[in-house]
Structures are given as C-alpha cells and as structure tokens.
Amino acid sequence: MSGGDNLDFEIRPNPAPVSAADRATLLANPGFGRIFTDHMVTVRYAEGKGWYEPRVEARAPIPMDPASAVLHYAQEIFEGLKAYTLPDGGVAMFRPDANARRFAESAARMAMPALGVDMFLKSLHEIITIDRSWIPQGEDSSLYLRPFAYASEVFLGVRPAMEYLYLVIASPAGAYFSGGVKPLSLWVTPDYTRAAPGGTGAAKCGGNYAAGLSAQAEAIEHGCDQVVYLDAIERKYLDELGGMNIVFVLDDGSLVTPPLTGTILPGITRDSILKLAQRAGRKVEERQVSLDEWRDGARSGRIREAFACGTAAVITPIGTVKSAEGEFAVADGGSGEVTMALRQELTDIQRGRAEDPFGWVHRVL
Ligand SMILES: *Cc1c(COP(=O)(O)O)cnc(C)c1O
C-alpha cells in the first residue's frame, strides 16, 4: 500500500435517514440487491496526489460527466462480501483481507491504482458502523457490501485514467435460498467463452459480467438457471459459472476443481472450501476437468457430486447439466451429501457457530 494514505474518514451523517419503521418494513423482506442503506463511502484519486478525501456520506446519485472514461472504456473493478450478526450480537465479515488483496490485483490488471489494504478494510468498518441498524437479523441474512472503483476522469483518449472514484455501498440481503437449497441446472454454452489466457478472467471487473449476459440469456432460453463456460482454446474443459467457481466431488470423497491459470476468478469461497477439505484429510486436486470426464463420471458414479461456490450463495449443488449434445444429472439431480456437509461446515464457521481454525472471521463490532 502507499504508506501516505490518510485513513481518517470524514463522517457526514445522512441528515434524512430512513425512519426506523420504514427500515423495519424493508428489512422484513430485503431480497437481493434491491434496497440500500443510508450511507456510502467515497474516496477520490488523482494522479500525483494519491487517494484523498475519504468520506462517509449520505447515499446519493454520483454526478457524472458524459465523457467519464468508465462509460466508454469500462475501466472498473468491484468486490462483494457480507457483514452479518454473530450469536453474541457482534458483527463480523469473512476474510475481508482476501477481498482487499484481490481488489488490488484486479486494479493492477485493469491498470488502475491500488487502494491500500488498510484503506479498504477501514472503509468497510466505517459503513458497517454507521449503517449497523441495517444488518438483517435472520439466520442466513446479511448486509452485502459492494466496494468498487472506476475511472472518473473526463477524457476520451485511450490510456489508463488519471482520476478514479472508490465507493462502498451496502445492501441488506435475505437468505439466498428461501425454502431450502435448490440444485442448479447449468447450460454449457457452445457459443460463448468467458475468458481467454491473458484476458481479464481473474479480475473482478464489470466488463466480464457484461460479456456474460448473452450467454446467461442463452442458458435461460434453454430452461437452465446458469451458464457454465468451457475453456476458450480447446472448448473442452470446465472453467466456471458466470459468477461462481465450480468444484467436483469424486467417489473417494476427494475434491477436484479447475486450477487458477488466469482464466477463472480466484474465489475466496473456493479457497476456503479447499483449505477446510484439506484440513479434514480430504484429497484436493486442482486440475482441468473436461465436459466428457464429467458426463462419463456422472454416469459411472466416479463423479458423485458437483457444486458452485461464491459469496452470495456460499455453496449451491449442481443438479443437471445441459449442452448441445444432451443432458445429464449429477448426484441424481439432487443435493449431494458432501456438498451439503461442506456448506454447513463453512456457514457454521462464518456465522460463529463453530470454531474458526484459520482465523477467518473478522469481528467489526
Ligand atoms: C466473485 C466471483 C466468484 C466468487 O468469488 P468469492 O470470493 O467466492 O465470492 C467466482 N467467479 C466470478 C466470475 C466472480 O466474479
């Protein structure tokens, strides 16, 4: 981090926050990404000056010049993590330092200045503290935090911008699966790829998501929940879903997941599951898995289960896979045993219901 960062946020409380009664109504059924807290964090950056004016202020529209670089060349990155209530009434986040490091890595890939890890963590503490009353209390609900940064310079030339804005907004979110975990159906797109070697697949940038929307629409057209991508070169090996990593469970209980070669996003949920599995004595392999291996393995029973993982839904079983060649079921189309056990183990640690062997739970309040 640049040692000179001023970490003292100026706090400008919202003069007209949502009333307690209205907030309670909103929190009763928050859904995902629909409602927002009273505040936001903003930090500005200018070349030669570094990050400056760290602020917590009323959430409001951001004035934007039509020539702002991000609107034209998509120099933008984001993160996503949760703050939630612990059994003793405290508030925690899960491995926010890992999000901070990934944010810096995404910034480097998009030729953006890195925000210091300390500044990133402080910004999350600030918004959680001021908007604490917005954290939903339900068992699986949380306050979803969305840090992001974009090129705010007013300039149409093609080069890294010289001005940026970093923000954090917060959105109360209900349980991802209301009415129990439901296995996903996946569409293997024959038409689109997500990331090529040397591309931006390992960066958490909005552009990757924009490029995936057509593929996701194709999945919906084929009656599937989500798209799963094959590698861009051979169109043979599984990469990941549009916003979640993929893990396979073999018949000997071992886990297999595609390696981090730059085309998939290094998920913190993925990493946490691999570490927990290894610690429990499970074999963990990071290697390529072809669609053929998956189809044959699902039939023979060699590949027992498969799941998708990411912060929002934590772990979601994969039930069926549909491609141009036909459809097959994984774990009889239901939720696998190992998948659901890993899900329980991870959420118990996150929520402070089980011991935290790696010191991942980061208490804020
Ligand atoms: C964010 C993201 C993930 C999951 O990462 P987590 O750190 O586990 O939330 C996986 N794939 C993509 C493309 C992502 O953007």
Image (cartoon, rainbow, N blue to C red):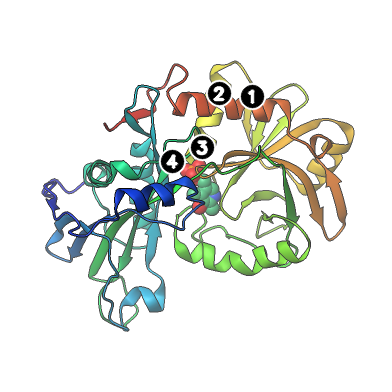
Residue type at mark 1 is Ala
Question: Marks 4/3: CA distance?
Answer: 16 Å
Classify mark 3 as within 8 Å of ligand 1 or not, answering yes or no: yes
Characterize the local packing of mark 3: few (<14), some (14-19) or many (20 or more) Cα atoms within 10 angstroms.
many
Residue 137, x across and y down, in percent? 42, 36
Give the CA distance from mark 3 to mark 2.
12 Å
Q: Where does label 1 land, which residue?
A: 341
Of mark 3 and mark 2, the one earlier in the sequence is 3
Q: Nearer the viewer, residue 220 or 24?
A: 24
Q: Amino acid at mark 2?
A: Glu
Mark nearest the camera among 4 and 3 is 4
Q: Secondary structure at mark 1?
A: helix
Q: Is label 1 or label 3 in front? A: 1
Reading the chain from its start, which is encountered first: label 1 or label 3? 3
- Depicted 177 relative to depicted 16: above or below: above
User: Would residue 236 be visible to someone looking at this image?
Assistant: no
Q: Nearer the viewer, mark 4 or mark 1?
A: 4
Residue 361 horizontal/vertical position (percent): 38, 28
